[in-house]
Image (cartoon, rainbow, N blue to C red):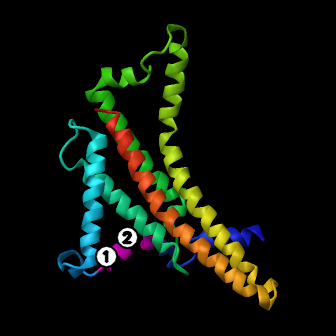
Amino acid sequence: MMSNLFSTFDPSTSIFNLSLNWTSTLIGLLIIPSLFWLTPSRINILWNKLNLTLHNEFKTLLGPKSFNGTTFIFISIFIMMLFNNFMGLFPYIFTSTSHLALTFAIALPMWLSFMLFGWINHTNHMFAHLVPQGTPPALMSFMVLIETISNIIRPGTLAVRLAANMIAGHLLLTLLGNTGPMIGFKLISILIIGQMMLLILESAVAMIQAYVFSILSTLYSSEVY
């Protein structure tokens, strides 16, 4: 039962032993018509307002010392995560963000680049982050250890948070879907209403988790300046 339940996350479509499920990560963005980005429309205007809002918020978090164009990196991450989270809600489409292979592959190199940039260019500033202001002298050594551990596990927490939330929602949808043949005809309507409400909740989770991933990445980046 459990193997069948978790098999919904397995990359199963393949040609010549090459998994094609991972192509859903980017192929959806490629098939969007180019006129969508050029032709003014309500959706396009709303999308531009969303990008502008994210740009202003990320710019505030990064501070005046950040490089020009840095916010577009995190906006791109938000768009990618949002698109993949939503794509996974459609039937028979592979949910790439439910796998640590994708989330960790994005979080780890990004975190490493932040750390290398900070320790090479702002060494004293990075050392100051290890001891919070106002820490008693007797606790400084422990605080350095705690801050170091919390800094090291950041890419893991970023990756696991996103993947776990995607897995949890899809497992609930799968469980509700599998109970359909086992309940009476009178309860089918209740099941359908429950699945619709859960799908709405998962749509909100898809947006929230994409925002959380990008905003935490921005906060981690702001600490190296």
> Dot 2, crowdedness within 10 Å: few (<14), some or many (≥20)?
few
Q: Which mark is residue 30?
A: 1
**How many numbered dots are placed on residues in this image?**
2
Examine the rendered structure and indicate whether residue 160 appears above or below residue 141. Answer: below
> Dot 1, crowdedness within 10 Å: few (<14), some or many (≥20)?
few
Asked if residue 17 can be seen in this view, the reply is no
- What quarter of the picture does the N terminus occupy? bottom right
Examine the rendered structure and indicate whether residue 128 appears above or below residue 32. Answer: above
For label 2, the SS is loop
| Furthest residue toward top | 137
| Furthest residue toward bottom | 185
Residue 32 at x, y = what percent? 30, 79
| Residue at horizontal 42 percent and vertical 62 percent from the top | 81
Residue 190 at x, y = what percent? 71, 81
Q: How much space separates mark 1 and mark 2, taking CA atoms?
A: 7 Å
| Residue at horizontal 35 percent and vertical 45 percent from the top | 218
| Residue at horizontal 42 percent and vertical 65 percent from the top | 82
- What quarter of the picture does the C terminus occupy? top left
Q: Is residue 86 magenta?
A: no
Say whether residue 120 is left or right of residue 196: left
- Looking at the rendered structure, the kind of residue marked 1 is Leu
Contact? badges 1 and 2 (CB < 8 Å): yes
Residue 211 at x, y = what percent? 42, 56
Residue behind mark 2:
26
Say whether residue 163 is left or right of residue 129: right
- Looking at the rendered structure, the kind of residue marked 2 is Leu
Magenta region's main secondary structure?
A: helix
Magenta segment, which residues? 22-32
Residue 76 at x, y = what percent? 31, 59
